[in-house]
Amino acid sequence: MGILPVQVPAGSKPFPINDYRFSDIRVEVSQDVFILGFPLGLTGPLFLPVWKRGTIATEPSGNVGGLPKVLVDTATRSGMSGSPVIVRYRGYYKKDLSTDVPSPEDWFGQGDLFLGVYSGRLGDDEFQAQLGVVWKAHVIEKIIEGKRKPKMQYS
């Protein structure tokens, strides 16, 4: 993973994902996620990323292999590594599940949450497990703040 300074062209307005206001939502296994990237070098209109859908495949409150990662079930391809991963919730969101009584913190609509950064899939065969690795957001924040140095892992 690398962090690079970005030169914003004159007349452009950046929208950094870590400055975007996200909802405070629970993250649970089986929720939808979207990986925003450039599979096989493809782009959307205006050179924007492609949104690939996935599903959280491991308990997000835990770790994978003792590391702060989450696995997602998705058919990604090369060009997706380093992509932001967004949890998207649509519908009625109940903040406190211990009661049936609605509260002011409940909402109806769409909520997004930055889950972390996609770093590739498990295995060499694109059609085996189709599980991707997502490093959790708090790890990315610590790296950016300079409080943690990434350790390179080779397999």
Image (tube, grey):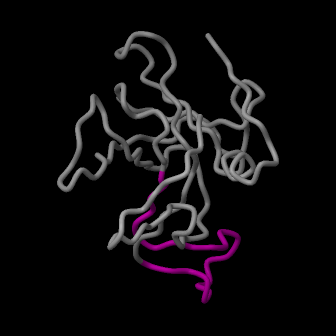
Image coordinates for residue 43, horizontal then vertical, percent: 23, 43
Name the residue furthest left: 45
**Viewer-proximal residue among 130 and 31:** 130
Relative height, residue 108 to residue 155 (above, below): below
Residue at image x 49%, y 29%? 132
Residue at image point 36% right, 31% down:
79
Q: Report the number of numbered marks.
A: 0
Which quarter of the picture shows residue 14?
A: bottom left
Residue at the (65%, 69%) spot, across then down: 97
Part of the protein shown in magenta: 86-108
Query: From the image, which quarter does the N terminus lie in?
Result: top right
Q: Which residue is more in the foreground, 87 or 35? A: 35
Q: Is residue 100 above or below residue 55?
A: below
Does the magenta-highlighted stretch encompass residue 45?
no
* Quarter location, residue 92: bottom left
Relative to 155, does residue 54 appear above or below in the rendering?
A: below
> On the rendered structure, is 105 left or right of 121?
right
Q: x and y percent of residue 20 in the render? A: 51, 69
Where on the picture, by quarter, is residue 54? top left
Residue at 55 percent across and 56 percent down: it is 114
Q: Is residue 104 inside the magenta stretch?
A: yes
